[in-house]
Amino acid sequence: MPVEFLGIGGTNDGSETTPRSGPSFDKQYTLRLARAHQEYGWDRVLFAYGSGAPDPAQVAAYVASRVEDLRILLAHRPNVSYPTYALKTFATLDQISDGRLTVHFITGGNDHEQGREGDRLTKDDRYARTREYIRIVKRGWTSREPFDHEGAHYSFRDFVSDVFPVQQPRPQVSFGGSSPAAYAAGGAEADVYCLWGEPLAETAQQIEAVKEAARAAGRSDVPRIQVAFRPIIAPTEELAWEKAYRILGDLRQAGANPRRRPAGPPQNAGSQRLLEVAARGERHDRALWTPTAAATGGAGNSTALVGTPETVAQALLDYYDLGVEILSARGYAILDDAVDFGRHVIPLVRAEVARRDAARADHDAA
């Protein structure tokens, strides 16, 4: 089974532990970070979405035109543009990148963040809207004839695009969430289903929920699974844990700032699940560490894998053994950690996956 590595296509050097040193969109840093991912063996980078952040589609186009081979995962919120407009943006970006685009649709788990751009729908209604939106985008990518649409959230007549993706029949669709409504929408429509790093047992349960939703939607296939972590690595276990506790101290100090403190408990199921795991204990399985999630209120990708490169690689392989094909990783010193992870962890995981594939092929041929 293939394995892929997803990094972060950040636009500045700031993180949860370090304030940025320049503008929100630092073009030179953006290219340095993307080229580091390309050089050190990553497959793809995510261009994330935030209500006040630089437009990820334009940043992705900027990188794609300057960095060859590195694939793109573009985050997009359906509330910010009409689907007929967005599908043309995506098709154009797939042309610019010569077929390197995947689109990650974000339904949105925080009413306050959604409201910053005028979105007033409830969470379950947002999932229904995302599902309708994805269906329109897929059809617009593939239909050469005008079509009509009449749905709960969108209505139009006689639309046909004049720009189509390079990828045939279309780019892949990525999706995430940990609620029943998310499983239903993503299970029906996603090519890739994204989860945050939970213990192995809980991850296995979520994977089965996604598969069940896909079967319930009448699919003969199932989405590929992606899981995200914050790796903290060092040459020895002792140094890795020293580094982890330094990072935790920085997170807690940053969280003491009222401007960076979450406004109340999280509304989304994914963050609630991370906090529940953290409340049960700090360490899980081989290397999963939860205080980083607790310190940020379960904000997004926030559980860590701590240890030497060998320990973290083995922990990632434990998830691979569950059927996880895409491993997402982002450190706290974004550029330096991307280089270290690519240099020291990715080769170990790839070598073991190759060894297993060769052994399986030999067994099948015997």
Image (cartoon, grey):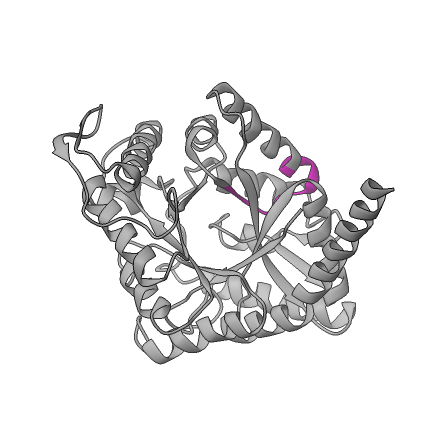
Q: Is residue 206 in the magenta section?
A: no
The reply to whether residue 108 is in sight is yes
Residue 8: x, y in percent?
A: 47, 62
Residue appearing at x 64%, y 50% in the figure: 2
Q: Residue furthest left?
A: 157
In the image, taking residue 92 as reference, residue 18 lies left or right, namely right
Query: Where is residue 208, by image quadrant?
Result: top right
Front residue of 288/173: it is 173
Query: Where is residue 337, by image quadrant?
Result: bottom right
Q: Which residues are magenta?
A: 193-203
Where is 92 relative to 337, above or below?
above
Residue appearing at x 69%, y 60% in the figure: 350
Q: Is residue 199 in the magenta section?
A: yes
Front residue of 219/180: it is 219
In the image, taking residue 56 as reference, residue 190 lies left or right, namely right
Residue appearing at x 68%, y 47% in the figure: 320
